[in-house]
Image: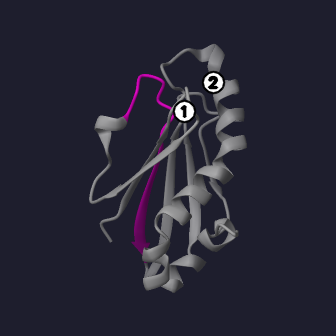
Amino acid sequence: MDRYYTLTHSDITGELFLTIDYYYAYDKITSMRDEVFGQWTKVNDRYFLNIYLCIDGEGNIETIPIRDMIFRRELPLALEAIRYGDKEFFYKYPLLDSSNIIVYFISNIPYYNKIEHWGKPLDYKYSE
């Protein structure tokens, strides 16, 4: 399934910007490398929503623990934004709401380079 998410934000306003396309929106990436990438994959007839986070950022080793903490704190909001921004897709394919979300915390430092299960898209369904 060729469906890619690029979630960015404004450091000034805090607004979130979600791009849904057949590829990542690399033109939206800033030097801060604080975007959230997502991609649907299928393995053995099961769908997964893979999320990729660049923990190292600009490569300053001293900021990695802080970036890891911020990504973990803000990730539920990011997942909610993806789920909300693509709600018509989930309405059309309701079984995907039960797919596992796998988050790749990407770092050159082994302690921060992790793969974790973060629930299912349904866990992040926006409720008014």
Please report the bounds of the magenta region as a residue range: 29-43
Image coords of residue 12 (percent x, y): 55, 26
Query: Is 86 situated above or below 46?
Result: above
Q: Secondary structure at mark 2?
A: helix
Which quarter shows the N terminus? bottom left
Check whether the beta carbons of the residues at disc 2 and disc 1 lie within 8 A of each other: yes
Image coords of residue 113 (percent x, y): 59, 38
Q: Secondary structure at mark 1?
A: loop
Type of amino acid at the residue the image marks with label 2 = Ile
Type of amino acid at the residue the image marks with label 1 = Ser
Residue plotted at (50% across, 18% down): 59
Residue plotted at (49% across, 59% down): 50
Query: Is 31 situated above or below 47?
Result: above
Foreground disc of the pair 2, 1: 2
Read off the residue under disc 1: 107
Q: Nearer the viewer, residue 77 or 45?
A: 77
Residue 111 showing in the rendered view:
no
Read off the residue under disc 2: 64
Image coords of residue 38 (percent x, y): 45, 55
Real-space Cα separation, disc 2 to disc 1, in angstroms: 8 Å
Which quarter shows the C terminus? bottom right
